[in-house]
Image (cartoon, grey):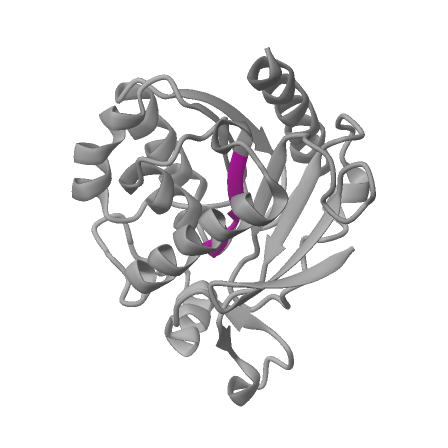
Amino acid sequence: MRTLKLADLNVRVTGGTDREGGGDGPLVVLLHGFGAPGDDLVPLWRQLDVPRDTRFAFPEAPLELAGLGYGDARAWWMIDVMALERAVRDGTLRDRSKEVPEGMEDARVQVEAMLGELEHELGAAPQRLILGGFSQGAMLSCDLALRSDRPLSGLVLLSGTLLAEDQWTALAPRRRGLEVLQSHGRDDPLLSFAQAERLRDLLREAGLTVRFQPFNGGHGIAPSALDALGKFVTERAQISRA
């Protein structure tokens, strides 16, 4: 594994023929969630059953949360942590579907610039890129996919939620036919299962092909989701190579 500095983001790159992103295999870019360290999702590349030449990149979010007592945790944009904790405790989580979080646009612009530099660095074909993430990283990936003209082989949404509903509804038809893998826990206390279903339905109604992988559990990545992700990456790799 090696770490690159791309668009002012630290990006851990692994997999491929040399385990440092070499070769011409498909490229999977996964964005971690709020409050996680930059290397939070890195172990996934060894857990997924995918073609050996698959390359992985794990960008580290730009915002540090050490001042909030989160150690080396990071974020793509800030949220009101205390309000969220109170809402979880009181069972009063609000509907975020109409929100366009402050800072999401800046994060999207930075990640898109990073993708361009990453593709150049690795010699990766844009049409062989699978973009995705977990929680806040899934929200950012979805927002980028719907707003960008960048070719994508697939989109992966692990325990994300619906944001910017009016904007996403208008933008989503531009991605008609895009393959999406979405997973979500039925008992997620942070981002409700019902909102995940609303996101699924929005994308399907716009013509995207969404494989929905529910699981019995909370806010996380279940083994069944990992199995589904491995199959998704393998299938997309075969199709994009053809």
Confirm whether the magenta stretch covers residue 134: yes
For residue 176, say whether it is visible: yes
Confirm whether the magenta stretch covers residue 17: no
Q: Residue at x 38, y 70 (%)?
A: 79
Q: Is residue 149 above or below residue 88?
A: above
Magenta span covers which residues? 130-137
Tell whether 162 sits left or right of 173.
Answer: right
Instruction: Please identify the residue farthest to the top as the structure is shown.
Output: 242
Task: For the C terminus, give its image quadrant.
Answer: top right
The x, y position of residue 40, in whole percent, is 68, 59
Which secondary structure type mostly characterizes the magenta part of the structure? Answer: strand
> Front-most of 151 and 156?
151
The x, y position of residue 207, in whole percent, is 30, 17
Q: Is residue 64 above or below residue 2?
A: below
Q: Residue at x 78, y 29 (%)?
A: 49
Tell whether 52 sits left or right of 237.
Answer: right
> Front-most of 191 and 3?
3
For residue 158, say whether it is visible: no
Tell whether 50 sits left or right of 161.
Answer: right
Q: Residue at x 33, y 27 (%)?
A: 203
Task: For the N terminus, give its image quadrant.
Answer: bottom right
Can you tell which quarter of the image residue 223 is in? top right
Can you tell which quarter of the image residue 55 is in? top right
Q: Is residue 226 above or below residue 209?
A: below
